[in-house]
Amino acid sequence: METVIKIACQDEKGLVHKITGILYDKLLNVTRTNEFVDEAFNQFFMRISYVGNCEINALQAELFAVLPQNAQVEIIPPALKRVVLLVTKEHHCLGDLLIRSQFQDLPFRIEAVIGNHTTLAGLCDQFQMPFHLISADGLSREAHEKLVEAQIDTYAPDYIVLAKYMRILTPAFSAKYLGRMINIHHSFLPAFVGAKPYQQAFDRGVKIIGATAHFVTDDLDEGPIICQDVVAVNHTFSAKEMAKAGKDVEKIVLANALKMVFEDRVFMHQNKTIIFD
Amino acid sequence: METVIKIACQDEKGLVHKITGILYDKLLNVTRTNEFVDEAFNQFFMRISYVGNCEINALQAELFAVLPQNAQVEIIPPALKRVVLLVTKEHHCLGDLLIRSQFQDLPFRIEAVIGNHTTLAGLCDQFQMPFHLISADGLSREAHEKLVEAQIDTYAPDYIVLAKYMRILTPAFSAKYLGRMINIHHSFLPAFVGAKPYQQAFDRGVKIIGATAHFVTDDLDEGPIICQDVVAVNHTFSAKEMAKAGKDVEKIVLANALKMVFEDRVFMHQNKTIIFD
Amino acid sequence: METVIKIACQDEKGLVHKITGILYDKLLNVTRTNEFVDEAFNQFFMRISYVGNCEINALQAELFAVLPQNAQVEIIPPALKRVVLLVTKEHHCLGDLLIRSQFQDLPFRIEAVIGNHTTLAGLCDQFQMPFHLISADGLSREAHEKLVEAQIDTYAPDYIVLAKYMRILTPAFSAKYLGRMINIHHSFLPAFVGAKPYQQAFDRGVKIIGATAHFVTDDLDEGPIICQDVVAVNHTFSAKEMAKAGKDVEKIVLANALKMVFEDRVFMHQNKTIIFD
Amino acid sequence: METVIKIACQDEKGLVHKITGILYDKLLNVTRTNEFVDEAFNQFFMRISYVGNCEINALQAELFAVLPQNAQVEIIPPALKRVVLLVTKEHHCLGDLLIRSQFQDLPFRIEAVIGNHTTLAGLCDQFQMPFHLISADGLSREAHEKLVEAQIDTYAPDYIVLAKYMRILTPAFSAKYLGRMINIHHSFLPAFVGAKPYQQAFDRGVKIIGATAHFVTDDLDEGPIICQDVVAVNHTFSAKEMAKAGKDVEKIVLANALKMVFEDRVFMHQNKTIIFD
């Protein structure tokens, strides 16, 4: 299995040469390198995957030594990502991810599912997956989130996935998990932000509907987009049939986004993502 | 070649039976029939194509006799649609349509092109296509449109196609050609309405861009959608490269929409379209 | 819920008029009608959905009375299709369909799963779905099929779905379930027929891979195609990664095909399908 | 404008470090680097784009000095690719490319068009594009190709594009322009190789048709694939309508492939392509 190095820093000449020099000296077997420079922000991004043993703190220190100030360097040993899912009532993304987790179709392991309704408890049981009901009834948004947050943190997950979690989040909650929380939105953002996108799509008479997986930021439906896809519809589709057709896009888009993120191929920068092959 | 009957009326039982009875009595060779009922509006739509000779006024009268009040019945003999294009400076849709017109790739013939800049006059000359420059300089929107309208009407076209015509239209102008004027919008509506959609798409960091062909109504970018398609982009695309990638989608989406409309397969209803195979 | 009438017969003038006349006399509330004529074979196909009560044998008799000889008329009352799945070792289609069956995402109910290996027994158990192991070890193809056939027939299913069943079938087996047995093939047929299509695709260096759902006939991988879709790949994909990317297309294509079939929208004719909206 | 360096050689540790070191010493402003290792062949591929002046022969020599034996190093100054098109009777790809050449939608300039029929001479005239008729009537394949070859070579083009050139080529002809000759095939290879692919697709009843742009090798329809795309069809499409729908895919796929090739982002290796963003 491969270790991944993710570097993000201000751009300057010679960065690739200096970085690869360190790996060369250590005789690491580099399996892939990708670089990108966001010229608008003069920002440099590099992903390196390698096979071989190497003292990670030492490597990180050597990298920092040749990089500009405030560089970000992550060195990520091979391991399944540990994930907590948040859900409400819709089963299609949860079911898809439970199967992928059980059969390791993605490099992740679902640790637990948290729901604000009991609807999906049974499905989790079928997969012997811990399901925590945290109802929002009678609670302020903040109070409810505190309970959810506490439950999440007992698992110390690498990522939190909102698998059709139909609650609006507070900025504080979004900020706490910034870059580690992924949502699937049931529209082709930025079309149809907010509620009932399929009804909106039906009312507008669109010929294609879509789904968008994005990192969650404090700006509702405005986080950095990771993956999008669409499916054709026509005048014979009711709003309900559009929603049904959309569910398949949602679950595949979410799974594709998670694959890229869990393979450490995604950089979040400003309100965008850089995603390497 | 086929004659097409388009019927739109309030729905009631037995319509298909009554309509097809009239065709059967006339021994017309019906090559295809399509029907659809919009239940929300209790509205019935039917398209019939037939081969054979038949006195059209008589046929229309017989159809009206069996249809509910206020039924719309169009009987459209086989003929190339006569079209006037409105353009500004971008060549990709115009070039594509000039070639399709010259080689009859679509059942239409471009009668003339009207531009508010001279940029595309040369391209029209290459196709011996009349190009009318109607500059908007120093004119009010209304005054300019009056000139455009007058020029269009000298050709009495079946359809007006806005092939990247970058002017906002007055409600009066849109209303005059309602159902006969088609626009290509350079985004996946309703995402990125208005100006500079590719810059908007770039700023938003989307992973897919699109184009939308729609009938023009007095509500800017809100007319009934005929056709949409998308193309994948990624973080390496500049706004300019997105626009370039989008141009190919625009010209194909516009051509596909025109094909459906010129084959008399499209019904405009409320703010939507019903499109038969 | 709706009843569906499926009619296939030699084409002649007035069929739609005569058929709809019978429905009109019975005051049935017709919700949709679709017709198509395959001119190469002078074959007429019609689907009618209606709401309302009506003695089915009488209706069928009246229809036969106005139709040409050898007409096929099916009248299908609303009911979930009862399905038996055949599987081998791959879980992705099975898992997807088990969830769809449990939550009725499709108008079907899986009665049982038959596998020639034990691999997927556990997954079936999680859904309290009967799993019958029928190993082919030491058996002739015919002998094994006889056992499978016997097991299938205890459920008298409407349809048999080969959800990655990796056995070649005898003509006799295919013939017995003709028009009722659907297979998902892991390539964009007719590309890469036969074994290891992803390895073939990798070796060929294709940029898109796909999947095909088709009715099973005695001609391997040559049955009438119901649904196909594709996904883009590139030079960084190994054969294994192509296979992984393909699995998502397979399961969605199969589900889409089953939706169309279970909604009684698909006609099988010669080696093709006619599929109505 | 950017200069592009393309390097292909046997893989070994430290290549990226050594190569980027040379660029760093020269203080070149590197705008993008991409690398890929084909592990099956232990082959290394790198593309570097830079802005800045630098003596190319010296740079090439320095690169060879640090690379393994038999390395291929191309240094390509910014310039429009000079292209000769070969055509027969179909206008859609030619028309699309003539417009792209005139408006520089792609980084290329068409020098001339060679046709084995007169059909497209007029279209070339409209673009003041030299058209050379080289009829094959009464000539052996070899004799005809000698004439075509002679005509091509008077232009010493960078690339030869077969824009629906419906002649089978001799191995000698293909070999002469290996890596510089691109063909658009009117099917989703490897489906429907050979003649009349749309008739084949119609007869097979496929639900998607496609097109493939590939480098020409001496193995008909088997050259390295550069780009593919598809479009959905259904039972209402005749073979002729499939062909019509396919033409749009063909011209866009060809244009997309040429864009990648003319931007020097494509490596041909064995029977595959490596294509960098």
Image (cartoon, coloured by chain):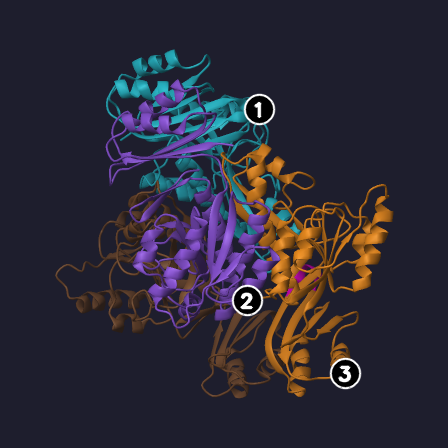
Chain colours: A brown, B purple, C cyan, D orange
Instruction: Give the residue number, with chain letter if any, for mark 3.
Output: D58
Which chain letter matches label 1?
Answer: C
Q: Amino acid at mark 1?
A: Pro
Which chain letter matches label 3?
Answer: D
Viewer-proximal residue, B244 or A195? B244
Viewer-proximal residue, A264 or D79? D79
Residue D39 located within the stretch drawn in magenta: yes
Q: Is residue D138 shown above or below C148?
A: below
What whole-number distance in Å separates the C-alpha atoms at marks 3 and 2? 37 Å
Query: Quick one: label 2, few (<14), some, or many (20+) residues within 10 Å?
Result: some
Q: What residue is rendered at 19% in x and 58% in y?
A: A135
- Quadrant of the rendered image containing residue B17: top left
What whole-number distance in Å separates the C-alpha atoms at marks 3 and 1? 69 Å
Q: Secondary structure at mark 1?
A: helix
Q: Is residue C5 shown above or below D38?
A: above
Is C231 left or right of A239, judged from the image as shown?
Answer: right
Q: Which residues are magenta?
A: D37-42
Which chain letter matches label 2?
Answer: A
Instruction: Give the residue number, with chain letter if any, for mark 2.
Output: A2
What whole-number distance in Å separates the C-alpha atoms at marks 1 and 2? 48 Å
- Quadrant of the rendered image containing residue B15: top left
Q: Amino acid at mark 2?
A: Glu
Q: Is residue C78 shown above or below A88?
A: above
Instruction: Give the residue number, with chain letter if any, for mark 1.
Output: C171
Query: Quick one: label 1, few (<14), some, or many (20+) residues within 10 Å?
Result: few
Q: Secondary structure at mark 3?
A: helix
Residue C85: percent from left, percent from top: 44, 34
Q: Secondary structure at mark 2?
A: loop
The answer to whether tags 3 and 2 share a subunit is no
Q: Report whether residue A252 is seen.
A: no
